[in-house]
Image (cartoon, rainbow, N blue to C red):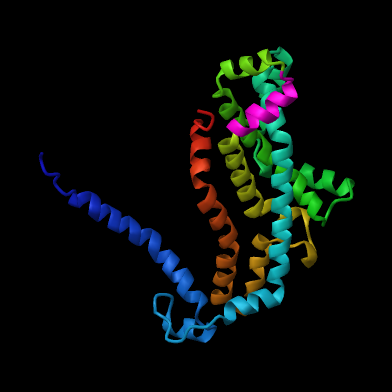
């Protein structure tokens, strides 16, 4: 057997890429364990001589915990709406051969071509007239609406991978469409459902435009808006700001670590195979 020659060029490229990705993470994490005077005196690359958790404690005691809770509420509600509405919608699109369903699906996918920035002004008037301005519900509904077209597209692709023989077998056994949906389609679409859960959760957790325009008071602030609290007219509390960024990253990172395989499979369209 021939010995494989080491690829030094690929190794060097990987090392450079590791430095490009790892250096910002190092700067961010190290800054969170330094006091503001130490950070200003030593610079962003210096290793801290004295570790402290005061930045995290100060963030949680200064209202950031409320922002975190509001973001959790928005994310959970958006994911709940998407998971409740998108699977039946995708199942109807896959199983129905009617022209009306196909037309409605195509119109539904127009949401992919309409950016939220283009409709934020009419959205503001609609939310205000509905009495939902400065309310978390006014953020939840448009966020879920803009996440649904992509989620529907992903889940219909996953459900189309389920072979027609399985549908026919359950139909021959006398199963109703409802039973087919719950006993066959949902179990075989778990990877696709995991994908839309992660996608919609990321959309809600990282949302900025809708909370910025549709909320005002501190009681309805989310994390992305709460980061502005660390910037004052006298400067920026960089260690405190980066500690807040780390706290906001942890839930998304945990969700991704547990659902990354299903996320990749769902996006590749092989979840039902």
Indicate the position of residue 229 as horizontal and vertical percent values: 67, 71
Q: Give the left or right position of residue 190, taking residue 128 as reference.
A: left
Residue at 70% from the left image edge and 40% from the top image edge: 82
Which sits in the foreground, 138 or 169?
Answer: 169
The number of numbered badges drawn on the structure is 0
Q: Main SS of the magenta segment?
A: helix
Instruction: Report if residue 181 lies within the magenta region.
Output: yes
Residue 194 visible at all: yes
The picture quadrant where one finds residue 12 is bottom left
Indicate the position of residue 251 as horizontal and vertical percent values: 59, 59
Indicate the position of residue 93 as horizontal and vertical percent values: 67, 22
Q: Give the left or right position of residue 176, taking residue 239 as reference.
A: right
Instruction: Report if residue 6 lies within the magenta region.
Output: no
Residues shaded magenta = 175-188
* Image quadrant occupied by the N terminus: top left
Is 179 rendered above or below residue 217? above
The picture quadrant where one finds residue 108 is top right
Residue at 61% from the left image edge and 50% from the top image edge: 202
Residue at 48% from the left image edge and 83% from the top image edge: 51
The picture quadrant where one finds residue 172 is top right
């Amino acid at each position: 057997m021939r010995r494989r020659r080491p690829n030094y060029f690929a190794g060097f490229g990987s090392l450079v890429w590791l430095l490009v990705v790892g250096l910002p993470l190092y700067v961010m994490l190290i800054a969170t364990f330094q006091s503001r005077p130490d950070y200003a005196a030593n610079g962003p690359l210096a290793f801290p001589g004295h570790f402290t958790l005061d930045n995290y404690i100060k963030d949680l005691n200064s209202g950031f915990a409320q922002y975190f809770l509001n973001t959790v509420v928005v994310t959970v509600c958006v994911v709940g709406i998407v998971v409740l509405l998108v699977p039946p919608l995708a199942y109807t699109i896959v199983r129905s051969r009617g022209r009306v369903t196909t037309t409605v699906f195509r119109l539904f996918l127009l949401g992919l071509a309409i950016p939220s920035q283009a409709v934020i002004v009419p959205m503001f008037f609609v939310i205000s007239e509905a009495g939902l301005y400065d309310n978390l519900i006014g953020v939840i509904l448009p966020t879920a609406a803009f996440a649904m077209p992509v989620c529907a597209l992903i889940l219909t692709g996953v459900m189309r991978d389920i072979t027609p023989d399985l549908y026919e077998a359950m139909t021959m056994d006398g199963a109703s469409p409802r039973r087919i949906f719950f006993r066959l389609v949902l179990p075989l679409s778990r990877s696709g459902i995991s994908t839309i859960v992660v996608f919609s959760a990321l959309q809600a957790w990282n949302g900025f435009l809708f909370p910025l325009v549709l909320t005002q008071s501190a009681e309805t602030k989310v994390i992305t808006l709460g980061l502005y609290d660390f910037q004052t007219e006298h400067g920026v509390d960089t260690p405190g700001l980066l500690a807040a960024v780390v706290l906001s990253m942890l839930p998304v990172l945990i969700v991704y670590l547990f659902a990354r395989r299903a996320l990749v499979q769902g996006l590749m369209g092989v979840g039902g195979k």
